[in-house]
Image (cartoon, rainbow, N blue to C red):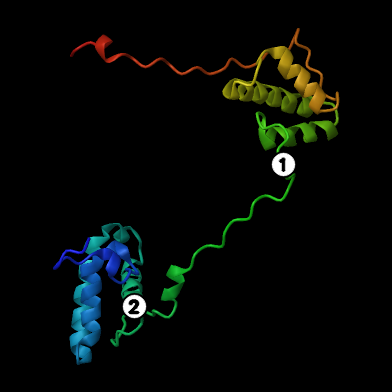
Amino acid sequence: MDIKGLDYNTRREPLLMPEYGREIQKMVDHAITLPTREERQRCAQTIVRLMVTKVPQLRENSDYEHTLWDHLYLMSHKKLDINWPYDVADAEKILDKPAPMRRPQAAGRVRLRHYGRLVEELFERLKTMPEGAERDELARMTANQMKRDLALWGHGSMDDERVASDLARFTDGRIQLDLSTFRFEKPATAAPAESPRKRKRK
């Protein structure tokens, strides 16, 4: 639908710094057209004072004034001819996007989704560790994490025998839990929410 007199954002040039709004951008565009450097300089200083009111959180940075002038330089598409109070040569770095993170290359597909990759890595570590207190402690933590994972996923039985069986199987028999002496951690349970009707009126 096209209504005469209405100006839609979809028809306007995209804003390079949308956080400052279109009115600030119009001021920057106007400053570029002013005939003298003195006029452009005064206009730029006024614009910067207005910019900080649009994004007041910038004041939390020690170099926020430099940042504002960098932003002004970018919003003018580097066409504003003034005496810049700061070096704006590196301003364009603000627009640089971080390189996309690469997915972990190790171990392609997760075989045991209900336990996850980290628990699988613990199984591999337990296979190679020598007997001793360090391996016993890691086995204890692994067993408790396995039990929490089974409870979280609702993956069949989550009883102690299931955890002991899986731990022995996936460590090639290196870790054998003695369920007559081994004690699992008590699972944390969230406190039930108090009903609004049961709350006492103060």
Q: Nearer the viewer, residue 200 or 113?
A: 113
Q: Secondary structure at mark 2?
A: helix
* Three-letter code for the amino acid on which mark 2 is drawn: Tyr
Residue 157, percent from left and from top: 66, 15
Q: Position of residue 201 (x, y in %)?
A: 19, 12
Residue extending furthest toward the top = 180
Q: Which mark is residue 136?
A: none
Which residue is drawn at the image coordinates 24% and 61% (left, top)? 54
Look at mark 2 in the image and give the residue it sits on: 73
Q: Residue at x 21, y 81 (%)?
A: 30
Toward the bottom, the furthest residue is 36
Residue at the spot x=32%, y=74% of the render?
A: 75
User: With 126 as the anchor, is 3 left or right in this view?
Assistant: left
- On the image, numbered disc 1 is attached to which residue? 109
Write down the quadrant of residue 178 in the picture.
top right
Q: CA distance from mark 2 to mark 1?
A: 48 Å
**Quadrant of the frame with the N terminus:** bottom left
Instruction: Specify which label sits upstream in the sequence, 2 or 1.
Output: 2
Amino acid bearing label 1: Arg
Regarding mark 1 in the picture, which secondary structure is present there? loop
Circle 2 Cα neighbour tier, 10 Å, few/some/many (<14 / 14–19 / ≥20): many
Residue 48 seen: no
**Residue 109 against residue 84 in the figure, above or below:** above
Whole-percent x, y for residue 191 in the image: 43, 16
Q: Quadrant of residue 155?
A: top right
Q: Quadrant of residue 89?
A: bottom left
Q: Quick check: can you spot residue 30? A: yes
Q: Specify the farthest residue to the left.
A: 5
Between 51 and 86, the residue placed more toward the observer is 51
Give the side of residue 41 with respect to residue 117, left or right. left
